[in-house]
Amino acid sequence: MSVRAYVLITTRNKEEKTTVEQLKTLDCVRAIDFVTGPYDVIAIVEVADMDQLGQLITQKIQGIASVERTLTCISFSL
């Protein structure tokens, strides 16, 4: 069973386009949207398990220089 999550991202200095270009290089990213409000970008990601999700968030997504902070919402299918 895979883990799906919505990753809400705030970028530094309005660098949304730079962030999206970096997110597109990650195989586990299923969709990316620009949004208005307190976040700049939302990425829908899907990985094999919670460990991979943690590594994806802390090492890859938060490792993007233009990412200021993230909020992860794990999705559960009914």
Image (cartoon, rainbow, N blue to C red):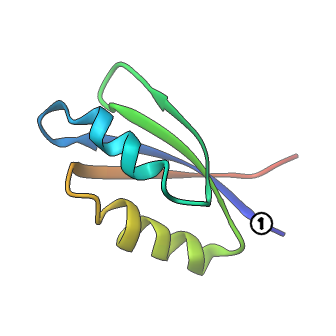
Pick whichever, 71 or 55, lies toward us: 55
The structure residue drawn at horizontal position 48% and vertical position 69%, both measured from the top left corner, is 56
65 in relation to 15, above or below: below
Kindly identify the amino acid type of the residue bearing the numbered disc 1.
Ser
The structure residue drawn at horizontal position 56% and vertical position 69%, both measured from the top left corner, is 53
- Residue 31, how many percent across, how many down? 60, 39
Pick whichever, 58 or 26, lies toward us: 26
Outermost residue, bottom direction?
51
Q: How many marks?
A: 1
65 in relation to 77, above or below: below
Outermost residue, left direction?
13
The structure residue drawn at horizontal position 39% and vertical position 40%, both measured from the top left corner, is 20
Q: Quadrant of the N terminus?
A: bottom right
The structure residue drawn at horizontal position 41% and vertical position 23%, both measured from the top left corner, is 35
Circle 1: element type? loop
* Residue to which mark 1 is pinned: 2
Outermost residue, right direction?
78
51 in relation to 27, above or below: below
Q: Is residue 43 left or right of residue 16?
A: right
Pick whichever, 55 or 65, lies toward us: 65
- Residue 62, how many percent across, how many down? 31, 62
Q: Residues within 10 Å of mark 1 (few under 14, many from 20)?
A: few
- Residue 78, how many percent across, how many down? 88, 46
For residue 11, which quarter of the picture?
A: top left
